[in-house]
Image: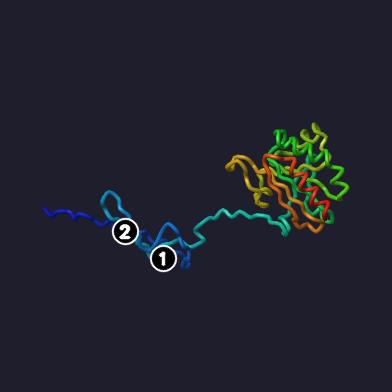
Amino acid sequence: MASLPTNPVAHFVVPSLTPKTPSSIKLPFLSKSSNSQFLGAQICVRISPTSVPSSSSFKFAISSKVNKGQAPPAFTLKDQDGRNVSLSKFKGKPVVVYFYPADETPGCTKQACAFRDSYEKFKKAGAEVVGISGDDSSSHKAFAKKYRLPFTLLSDEGNKVRKEWGVPADLFGTLPGRQTYVLDKNGIVQLIYNNQFQPEKHIDETLKLLQSL
């Protein structure tokens, strides 16, 4: 009986997926010839150029992000009274759009009340204030009534607008982020401020900018 080689070579051929068009995708974890040791056996993986799927075979999670100097994506959402409100409604005046995690949480309540207490200063600067979270309109209505909030709260159920604007999550992705945007009268972002743990700072930073516009 013939003895086995001391270092047998196992050859694996990745089946060709026959893409419609040649692919130019570079996969950092694969190369045309890579060697690794597994239980004393040498494994050679050889990939032919046609074995890599075309880019149309992959689904990428593309996350957009609004930056300073840009016009953010438009939206139409329901306010606390169930009425549709579009971002374009505020064109011609500065607007503060702040995304917050949820109604009735301690930080969000503190932030909303700080906006309420400084609301006359925002009006004096000619600006509107709009809060956005994933809560529904009835939750917003109860929240606004309880704390006498004089500004608009919009319901972004499913967090579609949050995702389109690229608002980052906080606490390792477990909480929706707290982020404030100041748009000038032309709808261009002039300030982006993110602070999960000091919600009152959002008011200070936005007023400081508005008073300089």
User: In terms of secondary structure, where does tag 1 sit?
Assistant: helix
**Label 1 belongs to which residue?**
50
Instruction: Name the residue at 37% across, 59% down.
Output: 15
- Label 2 to label 1: alpha-carbon separation: 18 Å
Instruction: Name the residue at 66% across, 49% down.
Output: 167
Q: Is 199 left, or right, of 46 in this rendering?
A: right
The x, y position of residue 104, in whole percent, is: 72, 33
Mark 2, mark 1: which one is toward the viewer?
2
Q: Is 166 left, or right, of 47 in this rendering?
A: right
Q: Amino acid at mark 1?
A: Thr
For the rendered model, the colour scheme is rainbow
Between 13 and 114, the one nearer to me in the picture: 114
The x, y position of residue 35, in whole percent, is: 33, 58
User: In terms of secondary structure, where does tag 2 sit?
Assistant: strand
Q: Identify the mark at residue 44; answer none if there is no mark.
A: 2
Quarter of the image with the C terminus is bottom right
Between 127 and 2, the one nearer to me in the picture: 127
Residue 190 drawn above or below residue 141? below
The x, y position of residue 212, in whole percent, is: 82, 54
